[in-house]
Amino acid sequence: TSNPYVEANLLKQKTGAYHVALVNYSSKPVPDLQVRIRSADAGNARKAKAAFGKAKTATEGPDLLVSVSLDKFEWLTLE
């Protein structure tokens, strides 16, 4: 992530669906967090949906770039 106080974990369900759990350990919100995901490691994902906010996505070569405003935590579903 673009912020050293934000932890990101890539998770895979038994169904094959991929998700990213984001946790903010800083004491303030991160208004424009950038998350870079290797698409090949996440089922060739090209989009992400945020459970609690809005996620903007773009691709850069083999990577999926996700921008999200993060308060304390977020759950991204990769597609």
Image (cartoon, rainbow, N blue to C red):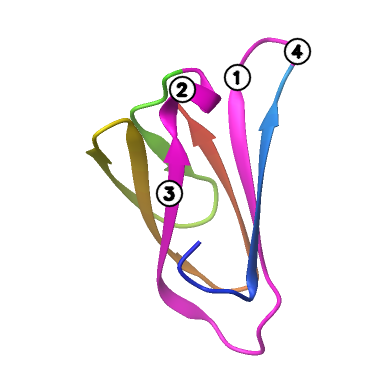
Q: Which residues are magenta?
A: 14-43
Disc 1 packing (10 Å; few <14; some 14–19; many ≥20): some
Query: Cβ–Cβ below 8 Å for labels 1 and 2?
Result: no
Using the image as rendered, state which of residue 64 and residue 68 is in the foreground: 64
Residue 23 position (above or below residue 20):
below
Which mark, by number, is residue 40?
A: 2
Residue furthest toward the top?
15
Is 15 magenta? The answer is yes
Which residue type does callout 3 highlight? Arg
Which mark, by number, is residue 17?
A: 1
**Left-right relation of 12 to 39:** right
**Which is nearer the N-term, disc 3 or disc 1?**
1
Which residue type does callout 2 highlight? Ala
Which residue type does callout 4 highlight? Lys
Q: CA distance from mark 4 to mark 1?
A: 7 Å
Q: Residue 30's spot in the image, x, y percent?
A: 48, 78
Residue 48 position (above or below residue 29):
above
**Left-right relation of 9 to 39:** right
Q: CA distance from mark 4 to mark 3?
A: 23 Å
Residue furthest toward the bottom?
27
Question: Which residue is located at x 52 percent, y 73 percent?
Answer: 3
Query: Cβ–Cβ below 8 Å for labels 3 and 1?
Result: no
